[in-house]
Amino acid sequence: MPEIFIDRAPRRTVALLLVSELLWGLGCYLVLPATTLPAYLRALGASPAVIGILVLLMGALPLVLQMFGRMVLERFPHRKRGLILLYLVVAAPYLLIPFADYWLVESHRLALIALVITLLALSQVIVGLCIPVWLDLLAQVIPIRIRGRYFGVSAAFFAFGGILGGLALTGLEKWLGNAVFRGAFLGAATAYLISLLTFHLAPIPETAFSHPREPSLLSRLRSAFRACHPSMGLGRFVISSFAQTLALSIVPFLVIYASDPAGLRLPKGIFSQITWWSALGAMAGALLLGGFVDRHGPRAPWVAVTLVVPTVVLLYPHGDSRPILIICSLLVGLLSSHWAVGMPALLELSPEGDKSGYIAVANLAAFPPAAGGPLLIAFLIEGPGYHAAFLLAALAGLAAFTSGLMMRFRATRPLPPPTSQ
């Protein structure tokens, strides 16, 4: 059995975590924010600006309340069950949306669009509470020397689930026709629920959620902001991540461009094929990136990832050629697994102890581009056009690349954990 299944990470625990990731990936790729959700809103008649609002909410809302994730989880007497309950709230909207679509799509389409955006926004808020606690849990379970490989393998499992989801989406599109989106949401909800059941079966000790008593919120914020100073490795990563998040704002609009009369003029059902190709790229990228991180550190692969968006927007206008479209979709898929680099970097650069606060502040720094980027991209598309939006994304990607070159991971000395005041 691979080395990743030994040491502090019991075989059964890690195996079930990986299966849970696969199932969650299956669900995510059925309703991928970069393909299915924009295509669904477009089918309902939503404008690029409205799609931009959804993209804004999907990307920005998880970043807002992350600092409070530990506080919320501490309210539960059994933390693992509490985390599962929070994720059940995340999954619930995906079960409700297909029924809302059935009842409202013919008579109240605008109300349906508003309801879909509201339900997905609620789901994303709860995701934000869960993310730092989940990552801190993995930091307790997975030893640092194999952390890159774990994130790489788990991202690959997630992406393999995405491949299955992409294949299922293609089949649903042929089978259900215009009702494909209802099937996608129901399938996603089912996959999420089975994933949570798998996580429930994983023998994770309660001590993996335990830390010394939290310092005050103000103290945690001060320490986290000190750790994010531009002179520190974590601070330089945050700057690069800020620019990369802005560059990524273009991704959900690529599938719109593919079928837009002002774009590539491909069939509207192309979103299902793009989803499958993206999942394949995510799986291959995750396997390559994870092992490279453990051997050489996160800096080089992160810098390489920042060049993906400039490359894609340069090639995408030529996507009416099927090989070019496939290459671009594979590269976009790699972007969805770039957390196989970003997450090990974030954990490595964060001071020892409870890392959830540092993770929350570092992710919060990405809120402005996550919130403003999609709206800015939508504004450019409706104004100057797609090429202006592509240019902005390329420049942001190059800025992320430039700041990424200045990062130093191994030489960074972590700050001491925050103390109570």
Image (spheres, rainbow, N blue to C red):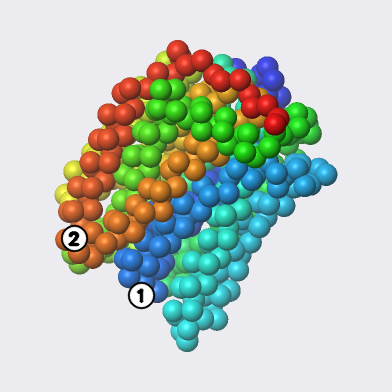
To which residue does mark 2 refer?
385
Outermost residue to the front:
421
Residue occupying the point 81% across, 43% down: 78
Tell me if I can see residue 108 in this picture: yes
Q: x, y percentage for residue 386?
A: 20, 57
- Which amino acid does the dot numbered 1 rest on? Gly
Residue 351 falls in image quadrant: top right
Name the element at disc 1.
loop
Dot 1 surroundings within 10 Å: few (below 14), some, or many (20 or more)?
few
Dot 2 surroundings within 10 Å: few (below 14), some, or many (20 or more)?
some
Residue occupying the point 36% across, 33% down: 240
**Compared with residue 312, is residue 153 higher up or lower down, i.e. above or below?**
above
Q: x, y percentage for residue 131?
A: 59, 42
Quadrant (top left, top right, bottom left, bottom right) of the C terminus: top right
In the image, 229 versus 71, the foreground residue is 229
Mark 2 to mark 1 CA distance (whole Å) = 19 Å
To which residue does mark 1 refer?
45
**Compared with residue 184, is residue 362 higher up or lower down, i.e. above or below?**
above
- Which amino acid does the dot numbered 2 rest on? Gly
